[in-house]
Image: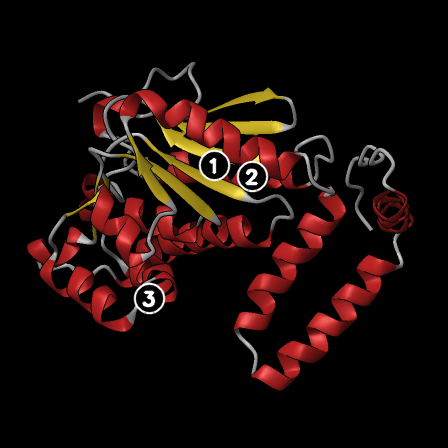
Amino acid sequence: MPDTAKNESLVLRADSDGIATLTLNRPDQFNTLSSPLMRELLQQLTEIADDPSVRVVVITGAGRAFCAGHDLNEMKADPSDAAMKAMFDLCTSYMMKITQMPQPVIAKINGTAAAAGCQLVAQCDLAIAVEGAKFGTSGINIGLYCSTPSVPVTRNLGRKQAMELLMTGDLISAQQAENWGLINKAVPAEDLDAAVAEMAGKIASKSPTAVALGKDLFYTQLEEGMEAAYERAGQAITCNMQLDETRAAIDAFLDKSDMPDWPDRRNT
């Protein structure tokens, strides 16, 4: 099938009320992750990370699928060490950008998320799916273990559930994905927009500085021992408490007065 028209972006961006929505735009290819698409996604995420007007990011897919994984045609065309390294370095770059950027990222799953599409769901900070969505690391079915998807999948699921997903290649339902902790919740298709908007709106209404600090701490302390994590957490709450906006909000809470508006996040 032909790719998206050359004059149309492979990743569409729409902003509203502090929420930036990025849409993977290869609907005829089930939004498979070609190198050009991954480069566009990395560029968009990098620009958003430095944009203080954006408080939440939503990633979704055009058409019937969320994302069917990497572009197998591209992988098969050149499986050399150099080509594979370039592709998966690029994949790692945008996956890590999702975690490293200050804004929380919500996966809005409109359809099947397979292989690297399931990886993308697991990498996002939060995830809401339609009830009919399917999830799986299906590479094993064609003799290709989902190595890179295994990284965030094993950090989201229990070990036995992750191993089952990775070794069987089975697609699981949205309800099972919710039960296993891969997504936050599954909703009827007609409720997807509202459910994502509600979650994004709640987060966007909070202090962007505190949210950014909290997201950074969340991921950093997970990789540390407990004592080091407590030390880092103590430093984080100290920095948070010293912010003028935080002290003003605490004063308002204690005085039972109106909460002040949160200023835009600024790079520090």
3D distance between C-alphas at marks 3 and 1: 23 Å
Q: For this rendering, which residue is in front, 134 or 251? A: 251
- Left or right of 149 in this view: 262: right
> Which structural element holds mark 1?
helix
The local secondary structure at tag 3 comes to helix
Image coords of residue 51 (percent x, y): 70, 34
- Residue 259 at what x, y percent from top left? 82, 36
- Name the residue at 62% across, 43% down: 103
Q: Residue furthest front?
A: 256
* Callout 1–callout 2 Cβ contact below 8 Å: yes
What residue would you read off at disc 1? 41
Q: Amino acid at mark 3?
A: Thr
Residue under label 3: 154
Judge from the rendering whether residue 141 lies leftward or rightward of residue 257; answer left or right.
left
Choose the circle earlier in sequence order: 3 or 2: 2
Residue 172 or 148: which is nearer the viewer? 172
**Mark 3 or 2: the one toward you:** 3
Cα–Cα gap, marks 1 and 2: 6 Å
